[in-house]
Image (cartoon, rainbow, N blue to C red):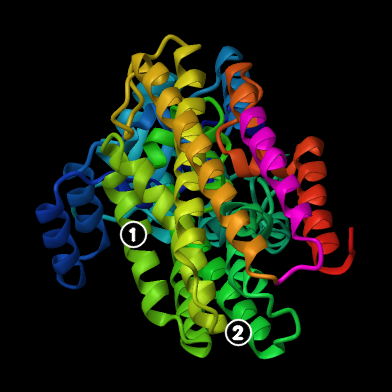
């Protein structure tokens, strides 16, 4: 009998799916009391009982798990050729049965129960008892599968590291090797969303508006505040993506995010979130904005966990998250943020937050979805939200006009009349964002869109040029 004629036993976590079903179950747990009890009993009852309790206290949607499509295609071909397929996993039987039922591929399930954790040597013993030593082929991915491969007649390597592949190759013939998933470090960097750090450049606005261009102590403190906001924001993005896992997988574009696609494990991401939060706190202490960072973190976490589900509350909170960056920059640099600047930024950021919501609603309405999960809006809300957003955008320009008049009267510039050119440029930029949204050019975030938009770059360059000319050139 050749290896291809023997039963093919397939691991679940990291093999058939890119993620870990236990971590997925913990995130999906909807009974906090039962989850807390399972966690407390873990040291006494063992991992198998813990998995069993987690499987019973959540609503894990196995249809939405990040499946390894190349492996599934291979299994379908083997199934059509008449091969006997077995799902052999350390996951709890309830989870295994749900996965097998969804895929409709497996002839048999061998899984953990309430008393036995079917991993490593225990799995090898179970498969040998069922099929005999060297009586099966095993598909796995990590070091815990080494004892199973040692008992198998052949191995299929799936997402295996070079070290694991080398060890497995020395123990048993390889039937086939399936390619690795995305690089973990790059996936983590993507999940941290470094492009969103551009928002934290707002901390430099207070020393700019205070004309403190040669106050290097202020700039260095603002730079530390910038780093503190970046680290804290990335930590919260990771937590937010973990909380939003199920919703992201149903989203046409967010399903490609690292957690949702399975390219980044939940445990790795959440450990990184803790480290980033600690780094952010340390930088905040150094720059003197710990209280500001704590308020920002509380606001942002509250938004991620619940407040994003409340209509209008979510967009006002988003605007507040932008504005608090300005305030943090003022505290760090020692240059107080004026009420004019706070008023302008408040209306501007409210308009951008509303624009983001309108974009999301428009995207989903094109897919005939009437309600946006975890947002609290309906597709019919688009028109009124557009009205709110455009009104906020124009209100910001009115405040900007009054602010420019105040700056012109303050005699801080050689040619203050040039500042008036900023007003139409800012109005044009915001109107263009709304027009791009109406034409479905916007993805879902106006800041990200602007970073890739050459017209936005030209508008920014014109504003900077006008500021520089107003300070140095006589007209």
Q: Residue at x 28, y 30 (%)?
A: 376
- Camera-side residue of 265 and 336: 336
301 vs 417, left or right, is left
Please state the horizontal and vertical placement of residue 347, each as a whole percent of the image: 46, 45
- Judging by the rendered image, the residue that carries numbered circle 2 is 221
Quadrant where the C terminus sits is bottom right
Q: Residue at x 75, y 46 (%)?
A: 421
388 inside magenta stretch:
no
- Camera-side residue of 443 and 328: 328
* Quadrant position of residue 261: top right
Q: Which residues are magenta?
A: 412-432
- Judging by the rendered image, the residue that carries numbered circle 1 is 299
- Camera-side residue of 41 and 391: 391
Q: Earlier in the sequence, mark 1 or mark 2?
A: 2
Compared with 254, 199 (above or below) is below
Please state the horizontal and vertical placement of residue 292, each as a whole percent of the image: 40, 74
Please state the horizontal and vertical placement of residue 259, each as a whole percent of the image: 50, 46
Mark 2: few/some/many CA within 10 Å (<14, 14-19, 20+)? many
What distance separates the C-alpha of mark 1 from that of mark 2? Answer: 23 Å
Tell me if I can see residue 129 in this picture: no
Please tell me whether mark 1 or mark 2 is closer to you in this view.
2
Q: Residue at x 62, y 75 (%)?
A: 210
Quadrant where the N terminus sits is top right
């Amino acid at each position: 009998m050749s290896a291809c004629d023997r039963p093919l036993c397939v691991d679940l976590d990291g093999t058939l799916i890119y993620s870990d079903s236990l971590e997925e179950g913990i995130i999906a747990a909807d009974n906090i009391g039962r989850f807390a009890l399972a966690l407390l009993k873990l040291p006494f009852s063992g991992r198998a009982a813990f998995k069993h309790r987690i499987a019973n206290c959540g609503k894990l949607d196995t249809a939405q798990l990040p499946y390894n499509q190349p492996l599934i295609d291979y299994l379908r071909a083997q199934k059509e050729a008449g091969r006997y397929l077995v799902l052999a996993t350390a996951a709890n039987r309830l989870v295994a049965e749900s996965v097998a039922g969804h895929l409709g591929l497996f002839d048999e399930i061998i899984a953990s129960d309430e008393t036995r954790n079917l991993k490593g040597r225990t799995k090898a013993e179970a498969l040998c008892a069922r099929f005999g030593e060297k009586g099966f082929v095993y598909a796995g991915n990590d070091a815990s599968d080494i004892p199973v491969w040692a008992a198998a007649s052949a191995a299929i390597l799936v997402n295996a590291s070079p070290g694991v592949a080398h060890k497995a190759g020395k123990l048993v013939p390889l039937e086939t090797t399936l390619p690795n998933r995305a690089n973990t470090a790059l996936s983590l960097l993507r999940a941290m969303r470094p492009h969103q750090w551009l928002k934290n450049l707002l901390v430099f606005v207070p020393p700019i508006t205070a004309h403190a261009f040669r106050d290097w102590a202020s700039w260095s403190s603002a730079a530390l505040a910038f780093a503190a906001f970046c680290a804290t924001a990335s930590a919260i993005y990771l937590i937010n993506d973990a909380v939003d896992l199920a919703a992201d997988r149903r989203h046409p574009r967010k399903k490609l995010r690292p957690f949702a696609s399975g390219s980044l494990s939940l445990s790795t991401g959440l450990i990184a979130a803790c480290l980033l939060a600690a780094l952010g706190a340390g930088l905040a202490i150094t720059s003197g904005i710990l209280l500001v960072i704590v308020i920002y973190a509380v606001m942002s976490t509250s938004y991620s966990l619940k407040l994003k589900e409340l209509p209008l509350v979510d967009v006002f909170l988003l605007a507040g998250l932008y504005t608090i960056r300005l305030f943090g920059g003022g505290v760090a640099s020692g240059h107080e943020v004026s009420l004019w600047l706070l008023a302008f930024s408040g209306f501007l950021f409210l308009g951008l937050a509303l624009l983001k919501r309108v974009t999301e609603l428009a995207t989903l309405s094109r897919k005939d979805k009437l309600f946006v999960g975890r947002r609290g809006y309906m597709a019919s809300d688009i028109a009124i939200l557009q009205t709110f957003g455009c009104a906020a955008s124009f209100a910001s320009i009115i405040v900007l006009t009054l602010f420019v008049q105040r700056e012109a009267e303050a005699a801080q510039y050689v040619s203050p009349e040039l500042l008036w050119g900023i007003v139409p440029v800012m109005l044009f930029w915001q109107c263009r964002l709304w027009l791009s949204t109406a034409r479905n050019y916007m993805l879902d975030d106006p800041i990200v869109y602007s970073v890739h938009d050459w017209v936005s770059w030209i508008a920014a360059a014109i504003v900077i040029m006008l500021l520089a000319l107003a300070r140095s050139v006589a007209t």
